[in-house]
Image (tube, helix red, strand yellow):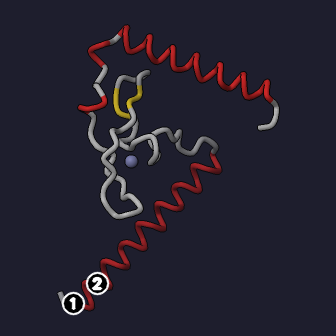
């Protein structure tokens, strides 16, 4: 994004969104869970340990978004287009099939 005015507009939109989230939090304090009390993200970090960052809080809905931190998909909106949703479902299907084959082959090799 090279247009400085577009950058400024984005910055302003971000500030408005943050202000709206803050207002929402003040309006419904009973729905708010402080960062320290949110569950850890748990994604596998590059060095292998589970991520300990707090999961992203959805201020609008007053609940956790998807149990992931802001670095591990917590801010993701997920697939939005029909094409993207189809791609996501296809990927999940392939992953499930691959896990099943690994499970089956693992059982066969150990004889159990
Ligand atoms: Zn994380």
In the rendered image, which residue does mark 1 sit on?
110
Image coordinates for residue 28, horizontal then vertical, percent: 34, 12
Q: Residue at x 34, y 64 (%)?
A: 48
Question: For the residue carrying disc 2, how many other residues have a C-alpha within 10 Å: few (<14), some (14-19), or many (20+)?
Answer: few
Q: Residue at x 59, y 23 (%)?
A: 14
| Depicted 85 relative to depicted 65: above or below | below
Q: CA distance from mark 2 to mark 1?
A: 7 Å
> Relative to the observer, which residue lies in front, 93 or 44?
44
In the rendered image, which residue does mark 2 sit on?
106
Q: Residue furthest right?
A: 3
- The image quarter containing residue 55 is top left
Q: Residue at x 52, y 62 (%)?
A: 91
Image coordinates for residue 77, horizontal then vertical, percent: 53, 39
- The image quarter containing residue 36 is top left
Question: For the residue carrying disc 1, how many other residues have a C-alpha within 10 Å: few (<14), some (14-19), or many (20+)?
Answer: few
110 displayed left or right of 98: left
> Relative to the observer, which residue lies in front, 93 or 26?
26
Disc 2 and disc 1 in contact, CB within 8 angstroms: yes
| Depicted 98 relative to depicted 12: above or below | below
For numbered disc 2, what is the local secondary structure? Answer: helix
């Amino acid at each position: 994004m090279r247009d400085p005015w577009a950058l400024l507009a984005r910055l302003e939109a971000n500030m408005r969104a943050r202000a709206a989230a803050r207002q929402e939090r003040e309006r419904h304090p009973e729905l708010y869970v402080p960062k320290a009390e949110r569950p850890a993200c748990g994604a596998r970090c590059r060095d292998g340990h589970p991520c300990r960052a707090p999961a992203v809080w959805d201020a609008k809905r007053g609940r956790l978004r998807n149990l992931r931190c802001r670095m591990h998909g917590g801010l993701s909106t997920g697939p939005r287009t029909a094409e993207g949703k189809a791609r996501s479902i296809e990927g999940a299907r392939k992953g499930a099939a691959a896990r099943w084959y690994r499970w089956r082959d693992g059982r066969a090799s150990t004889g159990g």
